[in-house]
Image (cartoon, rainbow, N blue to C red):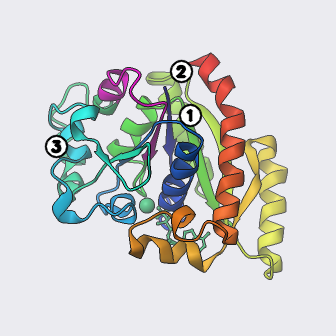
Amino acid sequence: MICIAIANQKGGVGKTTTAINVGTALAATGLNVLILDLDPQGNASTGLGIGRNDREYSTYDLLVGDLMLNEAAVETKVPRLSIVPATVDLSGAEIELIEFEARTHRLDRVVEASGGRWDVILIDCPPSLGLLTINAMVASHALLVPLQCEFFALEGLSQLLSTVERIRGRFNPGLSILGVVLTMYDRRNRLTDQVSDDVRAVLGKVVFDTVIPRNVRLSEAPSHGVPALIYDYRCAGSEAYIALAREVIARLPSLAEAA
Ligand code: ADP
Ligand code: MG
């Protein structure tokens, strides 16, 4: 089992879209995939067709309660893709977690105990570097970081990376960066080309070759409760996510060795 946190403390950069569509593509290759929706907004849950009334249990029950992954996970319409949804009570979890002595390891505890049920666990993080994201980083082997192609793309990344350093030093020495993916790329806009070149110059090979284009189909799919990969598997956004998943799979073996 490999656990990957999809993290960036900026909102609206494509974390949830990446979790849903990379998760779907990995499941299509035959892997058993579980998404943990760690954002109180619950966009990954909604985007995978799990309505608010269908959420009996949530990641809140993993963090603050005593539920295990197999008790909280529900199936989605995508074969081999399950999710532990988020509910609004997750927004109070950061405060409630403070009561726990092992407050940084609540998620790690349940991920560790999941046995061989899932091949890949993807954690869709909230847009902050608080205790929820820290729990995700402690529980994960690696981070997948979506970076929006915009002028200040690299700002904020240093803060994310220094958090990773701190997590490595204190809790999870093996935490690696699986990769950085550039999202919402607009080839008609010369600025995004410039941003993409700059990011590659600074970060090098950690940046995936695949860039995710700005694509309206990607933003339409969630309102239909299915991944873009099912809503329109031939749109440019879906094709890009398939290519990204291929790159992710290519990088998994080195992770499995380290794990
Ligand atoms: P985050 O989880 O980082 O907040 P989301 O994945 O929810 O980001 O994306 C923010 C918004 O942008 C959503 O409405 C989503 O549907 C849309 N979106 C995400 N990626 C793209 C893309 N490549 N092209 C167009 N819209 C996108
Ligand atoms: Mg999100």
Secondary structure, mark 3, is helix
Which tag is nearer the camera, tag 2 or tag 1? 1
Res 212 label: none
Query: Which residues make up the magenta segment?
Result: 108-123
Report the amino acid beneath label 1. Ala
Residues at circles 2 and 1 in contact by the CB criterion of under 8 Å = no
- Whether the residue carrying mark 1 lies under 8 Å from ligand 1 is answered with no
Q: Is residue 178 above or below residue 229?
A: above
Q: Position of residue 232 (x, y in %)?
A: 58, 71
Dot 1 corresponds to which residue? 142
Residue found at x 74% / y 48%: 207
Q: Position of residue 51 (x, y in %)?
A: 25, 65
Q: In which quarter of the image is the C terminus?
A: top right
Dot 3 corresponds to which residue? 96
Indicate whether residue 117 is drawn in magenta: yes
Asked if residue 105 can be seen in this view, the reply is: no
- Classify residue 135 as left or right of residue 169: left
Report the amino acid beneath label 3. Glu
- Whether the residue carrying mark 2 lies under 8 Å from ligand 1 is answered with no
Q: Where is residue 129 in the image (x, y as percent from the top left)?
A: 42, 48
Dot 2 corresponds to which residue? 173
